[in-house]
Image (tube, grey):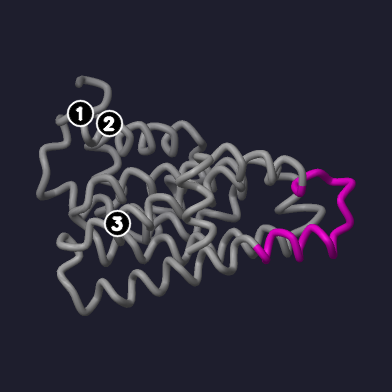
Amino acid sequence: MLLCKLVAENGSHIFEAIGLLIGMEDVPVEKQTDFLSSLLSPLCQQIEALIANAKVQNPEESPAKIWNIQQIIMAINALSKGFSERLVTASRPAIGLMFKKTLDVLLQILVIFPKIESLRYKVTSFVHRMVDTLGASVFPYLPKALEQLLAESERLDLSVPSDALRLNLLAFFAIHGSAFIIFLFCKNLKIVMSLYNGMRMYETG
């Protein structure tokens, strides 16, 4: 948990600074890959271990685990800010693949902790960041994220302030382009209708 402790003591700023340093295009690709892997791999492993433990316990009775997961998501989110879309999708797609694998891991949090608002907020924020970082290549991952968010949203009142970020994310996706809407339409009409309803509530709320 050394990296978790690092986030707790220094906030996410140190990871953002590291990301800005290793995310530069003049860093040799081998070193860049090694540096990023040395950070993302242990963080993802910690998430997976915490999720595995939560499966045999009541997730809502694990405040320490929830806090640790939040710190890790914050670290990864901050780290990713140093990497441009052009670098991770065009010039060095292997870097983009590492972030996609990380996204896969973090999306599991929505399944295991569907009712923990603080974790949903953090994961949603990371999905938003990955849209900026991975561009169109992130689209295949979005239905899974939206299905989990919208499934829980059906139980909640979407007008409450705690869901503001989720609605902002839906607005961002809708603005991002028709290709995303078409993609969702082909995959799941219910998600498109939920997205539309969410947008209407966002506009009128």
What x and y, as percent, mark residue 11? 50, 39
Of residues 197 and 202, the one nearer the viewer is 202
- Three-letter code, disc 2: Ala
- State the residue position of label 1: 161
Looking at the rendered image, the disc whose residue lies closer to the viewer, 3 or 1, is 3
Q: Which residues are magenta?
A: 22-38
Evaluate if marks 1 and 2 touch, with contact meaning CB atoms under 8 Å apart.
Answer: yes
**Horizontal arrangement in the rendering, residue 83 relative to residue 147 (left or right):** right
What distance separates the C-alpha of mark 1 from that of mark 2?
5 Å
- State the residue position of label 2: 164
**Horizontal arrangement in the rendering, residue 125 relative to residue 59 (left or right):** right
Sequence-wise, the earlier of marks 3 and 1 is: 3
Of residues 58 and 171, the one nearer the viewer is 58
What x and y, as percent, mark residue 205? 20, 21
Of residues 190 and 56, the one nearer the viewer is 56
Q: Residues within 10 Å of mark 2 (few under 14, many from 20)?
A: some
What distance separates the C-alpha of mark 3 from that of mark 1?
21 Å
**Horizontal arrangement in the rendering, residue 176 relative to residue 83 (left or right):** left
Q: Residues within 10 Å of mark 1 (few under 14, many from 20)?
A: few
Q: Secondary structure at mark 1?
A: helix
Majority secondary structure of magenta residues: helix
What x and y, as percent, mark residue 189? 29, 55
- State the residue position of label 3: 66
What x and y, as percent, mark residue 17? 67, 39
Q: Is residue 25 magenta?
A: yes
- In terms of image quadrants, where is residue 24? top right
Residue at left 38%, top 32%?
A: 171
- Three-letter code, disc 1: Pro
Residue at left 84%, top 46%?
A: 25
